[in-house]
Amino acid sequence: MTNEFTLLRAEIDEAGYEAGEPIIRDAVLSIRPGERVGLLGPNGAGKSTLMKGLLGQLPHWKAGIFWKEVEQAGRKKASEGTELTARIAYIPEQPILYERMTLWEHLVLAAASIGLPEEEFRERADKLLRRFRLDGFRHHYPIKFSKGMQQKTMLIVGFLLKPELYLVDEPFIGLDPGAVLELIGALDEERGRGAAVLMTTHVLDSAERLCDRFVLVHNGGVAASGTLEDIRSIAGCGAEAGLFDCFHKLTYLDEAQL
Ligand SMILES: Nc1ncnc2c1ncn2[C@@H]1O[C@H](COP(=O)(O)OP(=O)(O)OP(=O)(O)O)[C@@H](O)[C@H]1O
């Protein structure tokens, strides 16, 4: 389910780690409710940096953030950082886990952060633990889990929150095929209630199947954005070209070869 309103629009002047050394500058990112946007780009292009900026975790972040109600009211007022985090669930590539907490305790903590009522919490948590096959591990320590199990822990924490927007960093690396299918199923259900997804990935065939739109970050800014059709046209690729070919053409071939 997508609609014409923008859920979130970020007008980024500068994003980076050191003053005067922006990684990204003059970029606009917009996401509609229910939409899945693939944030693509070569290694080191700044995809994770952008996500950190949206989460309010970047030392240098000069950006206007406009949520849907601001746009619908016809006003132009940027949100504050604290407002952002309450509406976004971040599923990082590198799991963030507490050494002395069980899986269940991680979930309790996440639920408390949004004030989720007990009954609702148990219902959501039980369903997610079964879905991602971690039901038997609820009282184990995720710090001792395999990489894929740790990633599933992060997914469960994210889905538990039912945010308006998911920021998912490299969702397909490390998950077994069954878990990838469950992830896709869970994302489909979330789309049904209007939640949007911004995901970074280098697995372009999955991105092509899953995402409605793409934003290609390259050379310090947004080099191309739009549907696959738009990206084909920007890259000068034919109607049959896949995302992989367009990506390669836009990022790896220099202008003389285009
Ligand atoms: N904590 C940090 N402090 C300073 N510079 C950083 C930090 N993290 C990343 N960078 C730099 O920011 C740039 C963009 O990195 P970022 O992690 O956003 O890239 P990415 O597009 O997510 O790459 P990848 O596909 O490899 O994950 C790189 O030049 C990187 O060296």
Image: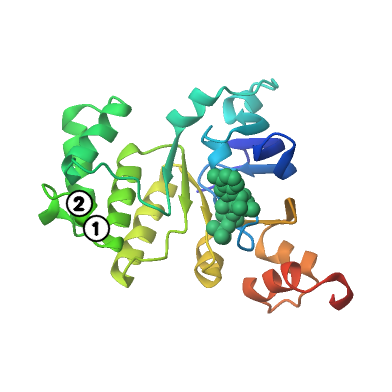
Figure check: 171 above or below 97:
below
Q: Is residue 184 left or right of residue 18?
A: left
Tell me if residue 228 comes above or below residue 54 in the rendering.
below
Percent from the top left, x then y, of residue 130? 18, 55
On screen, residue 31 versus residue 174, left or right, reads right
Can you name the residue that lies furthest to the right here?
256
Residue at mark 1: C-beta within 8 A of ligand 1: no
Task: Kindly check if marks 2 and 1 are in contact, taking CB atoms under 8 A apart as contact.
Answer: yes
Residue drawn at point x = 28 percent, y = 24 percent: 115
The part of the image, by quadrant, that contains residue 42 is bottom right
Badge 1 density bin: few <14, some 14–19, many ≥20, Cα 10 Å: many
- Callout 1: SS: loop
Q: Is residue 154 above or below residue 148?
A: above
Kindly identify the residue that appears in the image at 41 percent across and 65 percent down: 173
Nearest the eye: 6 or 178:
178
Query: Residue 63 location in percent, x, y?
Result: 68, 31
182 to the left or right of 33: left
* Camera sees residue 154: yes
Q: Residue at x 22, y 58 (%)?
A: 145
Which is nearer the eye, 190 or 16? Answer: 16
In this figure, which residue is indicated by the disc labeled 1? 132
Amino acid type, callout 1: Phe
Question: Picture coordinates of residue 104 (x, y %)?
Answer: 17, 42
Determine crowd level at label 2: few under 14, some 14-19, many 20+ residues with C-alpha closer than 10 A.
some
Tell me the quadrant of the picture where the C terminus can be found.
bottom right
Q: Please state the total of marks drawn on the protein image.
A: 2
Q: Amino acid at mark 2?
A: Leu
Rendered image: mark on residue 129: 2
Q: Nearer the viewer, residue 172 or 52?
A: 52
Q: Callout 2: helix, strand or loop?
A: helix
Res 37 visible: no
